[in-house]
Amino acid sequence: MAINKPLLLFMVIFLLINSIAFLLMGRDKYLASKNRFRIPEKWFFIMAFLGGALGVLIGMKVFRHKTKHLSFKLGIPCLFIWNLFLLYELKMLLIP
């Protein structure tokens, strides 16, 4: 069974967005520990909205970062549900 090219491209983009979101969370935690200029919180929410909620969520757990912020505790899981909905809808479009 061959995988169709649009689905493969989407999977690669999804993996890339989540990897970047995870790395941004780690970078921000590092910058916070050094009292340096931080990554604005809106970028985590933008990444999560665009499909990177899983990366942000895992980054929150792994780096223990932003875990006390109510906006992150509620917002990122909600965006993860949004991502699941988008994945389902795109799967329906891409797989005949």
Image (spheres, rainbow, N blue to C red):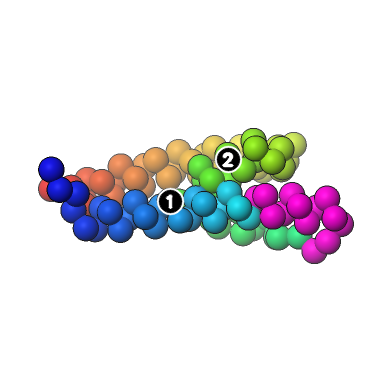
User: Taken as a whole, is the magenta stretch helix, strand or loop?
Assistant: helix
Task: Residue at 26%, 46% (x, y): give it.
Answer: 91
Q: Residues within 10 Å of mark 1 (few under 14, many from 20)?
A: some
Mark 1 vs mark 2: give the one in front. 1
22 up-or-down from 5: above or below: above
Magenta stretch?
Answer: 25-37
- Report if residue 57 is visible in the image: yes
Where is mark 2, residue-wise? 57
Task: Residue at 45%, 56% (x, y): give it.
Answer: 16
Instruction: State the CA–CA distance, disc 1 to disc 2.
Output: 14 Å
Residue type at mark 2 is Leu
Expressed as whole percent of the image width and height from the top left, the position of residue 89 reads 29, 46
Expressed as whole percent of the image width and height from the top left, the position of residue 17 reads 48, 55
Where is mark 1, residue-wise? 15
Which of the labelled discs sits on residue 87, or is there none?
none
In terms of depth relative to the viewer, which is nearer, 24 or 42? 24
Is residue 28 located in the magenta-colored stretch of the structure?
Answer: yes
Q: Residues within 10 Å of mark 2 (few under 14, many from 20)?
A: many
Numbered disc 1: secondary structure: helix
Is residue 29 located in the magenta-colored stretch of the structure?
Answer: yes
- Report if residue 49 is visible in the image: no
Expressed as whole percent of the image width and height from the top left, the position of residue 33 reads 83, 50
Image quadrant occupied by the N terminus: top left
